[in-house]
Amino acid sequence: MSQPDPSPLPKASFTIRPAVPGDTTTIANLIRELAIYEKLDQFAKATAADFHRNLFGPRPFAEVLIAEVGGQPVGLALFFHTFSTFRGQPGIYLEDLFVQPEHRGKGIGKALLGSLAKLARERGCGRLEWAVLDWNEPAIGFYKSLGAGPLDEWITYRIADEALDRLANEAPEA
């Protein structure tokens, strides 16, 4: 997650809109900038073609909201649906929130999150969740100011690459 931007701009100063297929290069570039900010650029391998296939292909896996200033993309929120078995309702998981450094502190990040919260409510979702790197104190403070809180009792686990292949190879035949 990127650095926060607590003070709002007049609505005319920026726009938030859903991404369209022509945005995939922009999405790839903004994700690369996010990876650099998070000091994780060595892991950022996604291409515009990957985003085109996985956001706008026959089975879209995620969606994106784009923030623009003067018609130029300056940030994004990439998200997808989850489902809570305990609540019996869908939720939204925010995978990435990013606003370019020169546009932070102007309310764009808050507007992206607000737009996503509105979308969640329109879709009958019961919650909006995301993860933040533990060193990103500005973002943590921003999220807390919005009423978000950490889930300290949960630990995220991940399996990927060779370990994912090994586990998949152990699955019984269908």
Image: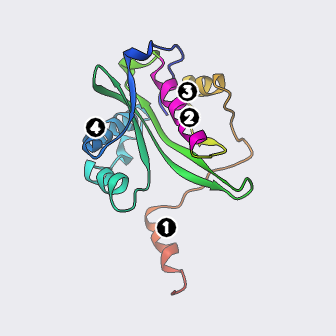
Q: Are marks 3 and 2 in contact (CB under 8 Å)?
A: no
**Residue labelled with disc 4:** 26
The magenta span reads 107-122
Residue under the point 53% across and 61% down: 159
Mark closest to the chain's N terminus, 1 or 4:
4
Residue under the point 26% across and 53% down: 49
Q: Are marks 1 and 4 in contact (CB under 8 Å)?
A: no
Foreground mark, 1 or 4, reads 4
Mark closest to the chain's N terminus, 4 or 3:
4
Foreground mark, 2 or 4, reads 2
Foreground mark, 2 or 1, reads 2
Q: Which quadrant of the figure has residue 132? A: top right
Q: Which residue type does callout 2 highlight?
A: Lys
Can residue 103 be seen from the camera position used here?
A: yes
**Residue labelled with disc 3:** 139
Foreground mark, 3 or 2, reads 2
Residue under the point 62% across and 55% down: 83
**Residue labelled with disc 2:** 118
